[in-house]
Image (cartoon, rainbow, N blue to C red):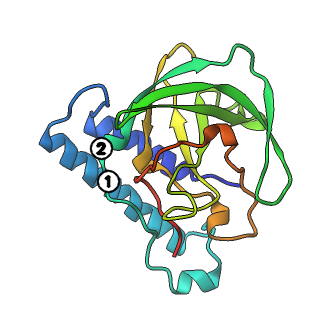
Amino acid sequence: MKRLHFLFVIVIGIMAWTGIVSCSKPNRVQVLAYQKAILQTRADKDRFFASYPDSPLLPVQRMDFKGLRYYRPDIAYKVTAVFTPAKSAGTFQIQTSSGRPRVYVVLGRLDFSLKGHKLTLIAYQEKDLLAKHPDDLFVPFTDLTSAKTTYGGGRYLDVKSKGRGSRQVVLDFNLAFNPYCAYNHNFSCPVPPSVNHLPVAIKAGEKKFN
């Protein structure tokens, strides 16, 4: 399944533009700039879904498409995680929505605190993409909103690390997005492993489609 790499490029722009890092307390101007950037990203994504050839929506879906649904931007859901690389880059078969597993590489673990909870997620990369994108982390997850207000099959974060020697990675759950199979069952999407179930409600990012 194609992931939204165009969105990932915009995400990097947001991080650079606002200058907000989760280890410092942003001021009101920074918060407003951050919220504006997130909303602009979402508007760009809506345009992509509505009119681009690579949109996952079927033609009949585009006819009534009025935009995706999201939680309001909340900078409290942008956190800094400590990244611990895996001792050996072992492979892992991730199940997919079509039942055909894919081979991923376990890159390491991300430990972070969110609203008073200490949490951990495992970062992966598709084996065939690792050589081309060695610093990109694929972080699929589920949480207590899954199958309630958010897609039951879980959501994704595409995260850019600062290189293999970096120990800190920014996780912005306002940028959590649905896999393409949330809109169109013709796609085959990785299913978040049980180890990446967060025992909290992540009320940030994309909600259920329709």
Query: In the image, what residue type sits under mark 1?
Result: Pro
Q: Left or right: where does residue 86 sit relative to residue 61?
A: right
Q: Could you classify mark 1 by the number of other residues whose Cα lies within 10 Å: few (under 14), some (14-19), or many (20 or more)?
A: many
Is residue 1 in view from this perspective?
Answer: yes
Q: Which residue is mark 1?
A: 73
Q: Is 164 located above or below residue 131 in the figure? A: above
Quadrant showing the N terminus: bottom right
Horizontally, residue 69 falls left or right of residue 14, namely right
* CA separation in Å, label 2 and label 1: 6 Å
Most distant residue in the left direction = 28
Amino acid type, callout 2: Ile
- Residue 14 location, quadrant: top left
Task: Tell me: residue 82, above or below residue 22.
Answer: above
Question: In the image, which disc is placed on residue 75?
Answer: 2
Q: Are marks 2 and 1 in contact (CB under 8 Å)?
A: yes
Above or below residue 135? Residue 66 is: below
Viewed as shown, does residue 34 lie left or right of 151?
Answer: left
Q: Quadrant of residue 151?
A: bottom right
